[in-house]
Amino acid sequence: MMNKQYFLVGGLSLLISFFACNTEDELIEERLENNPTPNVVLSGSPGSVDFSKYVAVGNSLTAGLMDAALYTKGQQNSFPNILAQQFQIEGIGGGTFNQPDVNSVNGFNVSIQLPDAVLGRFLLDLSIPGPVPTIGESLSPTYDGDISQLNNFGIPGMRVIDAVVPEYSQFNPFFGRIAASSANSLIQQAAAAQGSFFTVWLGGNDVLGWANSGGSAPDGEIDPLAQLTNPSTLTNIDNFTAAYTGVINAMLSVPNAQGVAITIPPVTLLPFYRAVAFNPLPLDQATADALNAAYQQYNGGLDVAVNQQALEAAEAEQRKITFSAGQGNPIVMLDEDLSDVIIIVDAEGNTNALPKLRQSNASDLLLFTIAPRLGQDFGNGPFGLQDPATDEFVLTLNEQITANTRLATFNAEIARIVASTGGRVALLDINPVFADIAGLTSQQAALLGMSAEAQAAADGQRGLVLDGVNYQPDFSPSGIISTDGIHPNPKGHAIVANEVIRVINESFEASIPSVNLSPFSTVEVAP
């Protein structure tokens, strides 16, 4: 998956609620003291799988990008690297696992950069509370290790349709630094690594880029050519299917190779879309009165439109803008789905088109990118008040339906393609984990187009209880998501690794021990 630009420093105290006081390092130390690891030598069996050469194919989720940056600790805690360590347990037969290390403590931030500084990963500042960036390092254009020995082909920003594109290294510097040839596609190079076992976790960016644009980017079903120039385009279904089939077939071209394919998680459940409430603005009485006066003409125009039968009364009511003193004021936003309205303004028949404005409601998702902009004056008055928020900062209900429907379609295609491999590839549906931890009901999971397994796992209780610990779907110290609001933190990656192990054991008659979650951190708190 990839991120869009956002800069989260300050201003989040009214938007995000964190509830843990201890840092994760303190919590880990406490758990280890209370639950000392027994002195046991682990062992297992590989079942029908040859784990001697494990190759991982994917996007930033596979690369270990977290906290909006690719950095050493994130790479070391990528789920493929965690898996590779489990495969090296006695009796399983796993080999070495080499990653294209960036050798950087803070790494290279993929979301934001400043003209005079290179920024690195985010840390969680509990005094705001919210993420703050570190000083990072420029991404080296070349990998200084042996490219021919790499096992991890996780490329941040890569879509399924990018994985099969020749010369993709010219468009993505993360692939450019490890490309054996400028003419290669990523999947050509990954297949050439001759993995006896592989994982494929692709498809998130084919939806996420569009969702992160607030649904303002093109839809590949309407404009397939837009996919060539705009990486935020919502991927065309036929193109997705053809590319994913090509990826799986390429990995299965290695004789007797077996693997696990992972479905796309429900992106709109991620904190990137949930951390900012739909009604985040506090106002004093004077400001509320001034805003109400400023929008009186617009509200009056809606009444005129109803009287002139240019607008239904129900929509007019939905579009009216009012503020009150205190907490919980919605933002003012543009909504292109609203009706075009032209009213007659005088006896001469002159007309005026009303702007497509309304206030946000509980069905809207405000993107994380909006947080530092709210109330700031960029020349048109306070943003979200006098200056309406534009489409790229809000995912409306209609846009959510579009994203979730496409995601469900892609997941159905992934399942169908995996089912056609004759058992050589097993499917890991990651959605039950998300449905459980997000606290969805089975009805809500069904509305999101999730699988029957995900609907069964949706218990309506927020949090995922593992080994007696309740993990949250956020980037608090008890959460499993990193501070960028999208990618898992180390704890989240360890949970994903255990899900892969579960599927391997069930599908290939292996007995690989589960990962001990206790040593893995969640988010790192700023000093």
Image: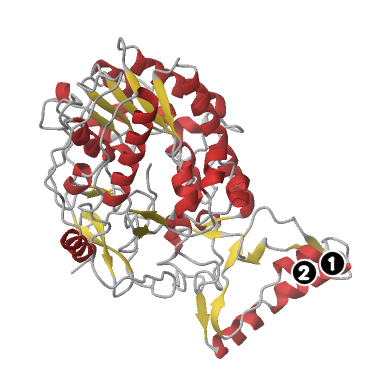
Q: Quadrant of the C terminus?
A: bottom left
Model colouring = secondary structure
The residue that label 2 is drawn on is: 302
As shown in the figure, which amino acid type bears the numbered disc 1?
Val
Residue 165 horizontal/vertical position (percent): 38, 22
Count every numbered label the image shows and give the total.
2
Q: Amino acid at mark 2?
A: Leu
Is residue 159 among the parts visible in the rendering?
yes
Q: Is residue 151 left or right of residue 466?
A: left
Q: Which residue is mark 1?
A: 306
Q: Can you tell which mark lies on residue 45?
A: none
Q: Is residue 229 left or right of residue 166?
A: right
When asked about the image quadrant of residue 229, the answer is top left
- In the image, taking residue 179 as reference, residue 362 lies left or right, namely right
- Quadrant assignment, res 130: bottom left
Tell me the SS state at disc 1: helix
Residue 489 seen anywhere in this rendered image of the structure: no
**Rendered position, 20 above or below 147:** below
Percent of width and height locating residue 87: 21, 30
Q: Nearer the viewer, residue 405 or 380?
A: 405
The residue sitting at 46% across, 30% down in the picture is 228
Which image quadrant: the N terminus?
top left
Image x and y of residue 313, in percent? 82, 66
Q: Is residue 420 above or below residue 504?
A: above
Q: Residue 36 versus residue 232: which sits nearer the camera?
A: 36
Q: Are marks 2 and 1 in contact (CB under 8 Å)?
A: yes
Q: Secondary structure at mark 2?
A: helix
Considering depth in this image, is 102 or 51 the residue closer to the camera? Answer: 51
